[in-house]
Image (spheres, rainbow, N blue to C red):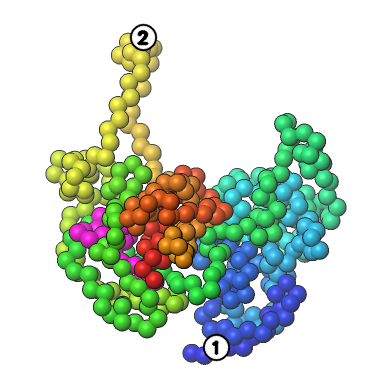
């Protein structure tokens, strides 16, 4: 398999590029050209965060092979604003309050641009159809639809009433988000947008068992792979091996057993993402499978397997709520309805995948760039894992592509810091 020579006209600039046959347009834009305004949400063509315009059509860059685009015209969010002036769509998204976390915004705007370029005054149904492949978790879509309507109706001239009102009086006025311009232009920096020279790439080996004893972890083949800078297991953690915001019972890297499918076992840092991925596949793990529980009801059964040995009955916490005289209230009621109700598990569904970069300083301090809701808790837990004072750890909170309470745990922070320190 050899690289192919292609020419792409990206935002009007001709570029001579060499690409592998399997390289996606998204990888090319983000990793090679470093136009990070186009976002990688799902990587499978489902979320629309990577939408760009190719030869006048909206396409999902993550599932579009770059090698097939020789001679194509590619427009990304970075090419819309001209001479410091926002494109009408970008201004409309600000004016209509269609920008919140901002992660879906570039793809949403580019999908809308492809529509308006071919149909300057679309109907509501036209807009809904054009944005069907673009997901947004924050806005509820109403403000986005208003923004596209506004851009289609008014053309290039926009009222500045919102901005003028904000300058005159804040209270009682619709005020644009202070970060809205950065988000509609693709300039807002999320953790995965960061790039450093000689940056290493990390991968985590995760458990394929829901519950199993760890008999052996052999990392010899991974360590010997050319391009691998470090392979770490729990034995390489200098400080606390577990973390947690309620109780420190979550292993950063498991050493005795795994407790869910996806539990972390080892870390790899390598010169490229592909090498790191290959190294992870070379790590050998022997398991002794254990009985598992898959629901709260199973976990509470008298003979249920114990997930954490120091948690009898698998009960983390029991909260009793008693308010008023319920027995008396029922006695005075004309009708009493008794029933069991169940609510499903619901994913927070933020579009931005977990990402982070850890940078070792010449002074021995570690800086971790991450999209998080709890930077001070991150700092405490990273410091405990590294066995250093908190002042030796700095957390830089990047733009957060949605969270909704879902980014309040350690994910990449400690692994990245451990690898940065080791390398």
Q: Nearer the viewer, mark 1 or mark 2?
A: 1
Residue at position x 36%, y 14% in the image: 324
Q: Can residue 261 be found in the magenta stretch?
A: yes
Residue at position x 76%, y 52% in the image: 91
How far apart are the two marked residues, 1 and 2, measured between alpha carbons? 80 Å
In magenta, the rendered stretch is 251-269
Is residue 347 in sight in this rendering?
Answer: no
Image mark for residue 332: 2
- The location of residue 338, given as percent across then percent down, is 33, 24
Q: Is residue 91 above or below residue 33?
A: above
Q: Residues within 10 Å of mark 2 (few under 14, many from 20)?
A: few
- The location of residue 119, given as percent across then percent down, is 78, 60
- The location of residue 238, given as percent across then percent down, is 29, 60
Residue at position x 34%, y 47% in the image: 244
Image mark for residue 3: 1
Helix, strand or loop status at disc 2: loop
Residue at position x 16%, y 66% in the image: 215
Q: Nearer the viewer, residue 68 or 93?
A: 93
Check the image and name the residue furthest to the left: 303
Q: Is residue 43 above or below residue 402?
A: below
């Amino acid at each position: 398999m050899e690289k192919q020579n292609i020419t792409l006209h990206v935002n009007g600039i001709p570029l001579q590029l060499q690409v592998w046959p399997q390289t996606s347009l998204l990888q090319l834009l983000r990793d090679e050209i470093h136009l990070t305004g186009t976002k990688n949400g799902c990587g499978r063509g489902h979320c629309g965060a990577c939408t760009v315009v190719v030869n006048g059509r909206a396409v999902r860059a993550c599932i579009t092979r770059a090698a097939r685009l020789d001679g194509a015209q590619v427009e990304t969010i970075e090419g819309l604003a001209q001479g410091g002036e926002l494109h009408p769509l970008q201004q409309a998204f600000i004016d209509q309050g269609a920008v919140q976390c901002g992660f879906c915004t570039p793809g949403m705007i580019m999908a809308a641009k492809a529509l308006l370029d071919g149909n300057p005054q679309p109907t509501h149904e036209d807009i809904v159809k054009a944005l069907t492949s673009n997901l947004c978790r924050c806005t509820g879509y109403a403000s986005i639809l208003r923004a596209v309507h506004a851009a289609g109706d008014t053309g290039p001239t926009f009222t500045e009433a919102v901005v003028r009102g904000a300058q005159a009086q804040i209270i009682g006025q619709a005020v644009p988000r202070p970060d809205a311009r950065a988000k509609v232009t693709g300039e807002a920096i999320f953790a995965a947008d960061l790039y450093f020279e000689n940056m290493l790439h990390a991968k985590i080996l995760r458990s394929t068992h829901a519950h199993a004893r760890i008999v052996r972890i052999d990392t010899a083949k991974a360590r010997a792979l050319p391009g691998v800078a470090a392979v770490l297991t729990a034995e390489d953690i200098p400080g606390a091996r577990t973390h947690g915001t309620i109780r420190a019972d979550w292993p950063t890297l498991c050493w005795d057993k795994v407790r869910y499918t996806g539990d972390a076992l080892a870390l790899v840092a390598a010169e490229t993402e592909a090498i790191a991925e290959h190294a992870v596949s070379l790590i050998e793990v022997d398991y002794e499978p254990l009985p598992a529980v898959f629901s709260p009801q199973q976990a509470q059964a008298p003979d249920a397997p114990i997930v954490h040995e120091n948690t009898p009955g698998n009960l983390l916490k029991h909260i009793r709520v008693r308010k008023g005289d319920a027995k008396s209230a029922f006695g005075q009621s004309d009708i009493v309805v008794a029933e069991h109700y169940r609510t499903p598990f619901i994913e927070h569904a933020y579009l931005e995948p977990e990402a982070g970069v850890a940078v070792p300083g010449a002074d021995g301090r570690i800086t971790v760039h991450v999209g998080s809701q709890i930077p001070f808790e991150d700092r405490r837990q990273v410091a405990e894992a590294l066995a250093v004072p908190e002042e030796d750890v700095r957390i830089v909170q990047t733009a957060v592509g949605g969270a909704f309470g879902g980014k309040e745990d350690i994910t990449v922070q400690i692994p990245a810091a451990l690898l940065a320190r080791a390398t």
